Image (spheres, grey):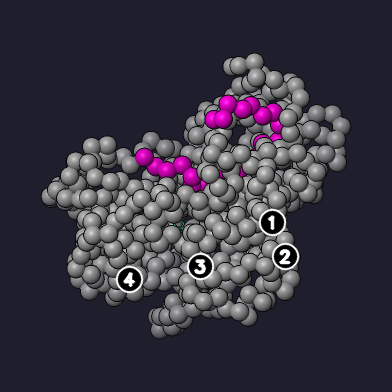
Amino acid sequence: MSADETRTTQPDCDVVVVGAGFAGIYALWRARQRGLRARGFERASDVGGTWFWNAYPGARCDVESYNYAYFFDPEIVREWDWSDACAAQDEIQRYLRFVAERCDVVKDITFDTKVLSARYDETAGLWSIRTSGGETVVCRYAILAIGALSDPKAPDIEGVNEFAGEAYYTSSWPKDGSAVLHGKRVGVIGTGSSGVQAIPEIAKIASEVFVFQRTANYVTPTRAGPMDPKLVAALRKDPQATRRAFRDTYGGHIPLDMGSERFSELDDSGRERALLKAWAGNYIALAFRDAYLPEANAAISEFIRQRMGEQVTDLWTAEHLVPWDHPYGGKRPCQSDVYLQAFNQPHVHLIALTETPIERIVPGGITTTAETIPLDVIVYATGFDAISGPVFAIDILGMKGQSMKDTWADGPVNYLGTMVQGFPNLFLPSSAMSPSVLSNMATLAEQQIDFIFDTIEWLDQHGRPRLHPRPESQRHWREETLRYAERRPGALTTKSWYSGANIPGKPRVFMVYCGGFQRYNETCYAELERGFPGYEVMGSP
Ligand code: N01
């Protein structure tokens, strides 16, 4: 350790914020509002987080833009006009740049700089943050706004480095236009949300497209299209009320129309009627008031499978594009109006890896157990080491030199999805055991950053310098997360990245709190109102 790294007696600033996506930008603004000195670090060359990196063809938000946005500043809400109900990646990145400039936080951010380590000095009660730029910054609070899906999964396929053609990742698509796929033979590996969005766009320009699908996914129609001016006007009328209303829902978004009838009380024709109505209304997952029941979920899953199959002309392709091995919601469902139809074109081919697995990548293409498919380009849409991956990418040492990697060796533990015992004043928004990807991430970013800064304000007001959760609070929170996961059809039985199943050797722990946004928000603020009984509040007043 250099002399510079041990210099922790005086803070250089109050807060270090790592990451400049939705949470990071808002955190820097909240710090400014509280009169705290803040530094931001971002590994990309601009703001945007996820929306900076995932610039693949077809990338677009499948949560509607009018609620996948900030609501803390009424002027921002009124000034920004979305061009589509589900904005594309470049528009969301432009929006985040607009907000960062509007809040004047760009000057606080050091770009093109990775945070390498975070070390807690127990005597001084301060964090030392070391960056790839050779800087060490000492601070009172560290906020790792690094996102849940920012650490791409390395493809676990033999021969990856032997491919002689071009290879691209959806998670770091070149922004300089250098990925030219026109007239080429393109192989796409992966059919999660990224692959499903990218494949139809690639099919527009490539001469042949080979889709290497290991697991078929549920694909339902998008809600993309023109904005509803009446809805926009209603949301803009009182942005603070809108913000509160979002936080009082299960998913942290505009209140949704839920089926008015119960699956358990309907006969077959009533169920079919409710499913058709929900399909037309776009929220098939909420077709019934008791859609959480396994039998209701099974009916929804079967209904979607039928609708999916109807869109594909070739029988074998239709059968293989339909998911049979997990219920709807077990994996993150995809949305597209054009994905399934893309397979009706003669130059788009489905390779079902369940029948003919990939053996290896060879210089000229991909070899499956049936054949070698010659390719000019391979696109990896193979996902992320979700939630714990980005945390492990930073070498974090807390009290008594305890490392985050050891603390999370059996899977993530924390309290209220933001703080880990033994790591005082280190905050992890969008991380494990929060509603994260099962909620509206934009609403969650604002809620968690609000809770973090309200916590900091409480500490300052009570003259207490730091806090961290009690071990029993963490145990309780993990049990709570598991309890809610048990009620979610398919959560614990499906191989998904929600529980780390996409990464060989990763501990299987369901990492998303599915008790609902409203309950999550209320639980966080109940802690604050009761003076943080679930935490050890440290230092004398
Ligand atoms: O990643 P994924 P993603 N051989 O993990 C396959 C968010 N998002 O980037 O299912 C062959 O879902 C893997 O197969 P399997 C969203 O939260 C949001 O698509 O493991 N295949 C799977 O098909 C989403 O959930 C938007 O059997 C291999 C695919 O690769 C999250 O990002 C848009 C393989 C990975 O799918 C991640 O989505 C896009 C191998 N060795 C993404 N390894 C919005 O619209 C992996 N696969 C908001």
Please say whether residue 62 is one of the residues in the magenta stretch: no
Q: Earlier in the sequence, mark 1 or mark 4?
A: 1
Mark 2 → mark 1, Cα distance in angstroms: 10 Å
Q: Earlier in the sequence, mark 2 or mark 1?
A: 2
- Mark 3 falls on what kind of element? loop
Q: Is mark 3 within 8 Å of ligand 1?
A: yes
Q: Which mark is residue 308?
A: 4
Q: Which mark is residue 43?
A: none
Indicate the amino acid at tag 2.
Glu
Percent of width and height locating residue 480: 59, 48
**Can residue 377 be seen in the rendering of this structure?**
yes
Q: Which mark is residue 75?
A: 2
Question: Residue 516's image quarter?
Answer: bottom right
Q: Which mark is residue 86?
A: 3
Q: Which residue is mark 1?
A: 102
Q: Is residue 62 left or right of residue 178?
A: right
Quadrant (top left, top right, bottom left, bottom right) of the C terminus? top right
Q: Residue at x 80, y 39 (%)?
A: 459
Q: Earlier in the sequence, mark 4 or mark 3?
A: 3
Q: Nearer the viewer, mark 3 or mark 1?
A: 1
- Mark 2 falls on what kind of element? helix
Q: Earlier in the sequence, mark 3 or mark 1?
A: 3
Indicate the amino acid at tag 3.
Cys
Q: Is residue 265 above or below residue 26?
A: below
Mark 4 → mark 2, Cα distance in angstroms: 42 Å
Q: Nearer the viewer, mark 4 or mark 2?
A: 2
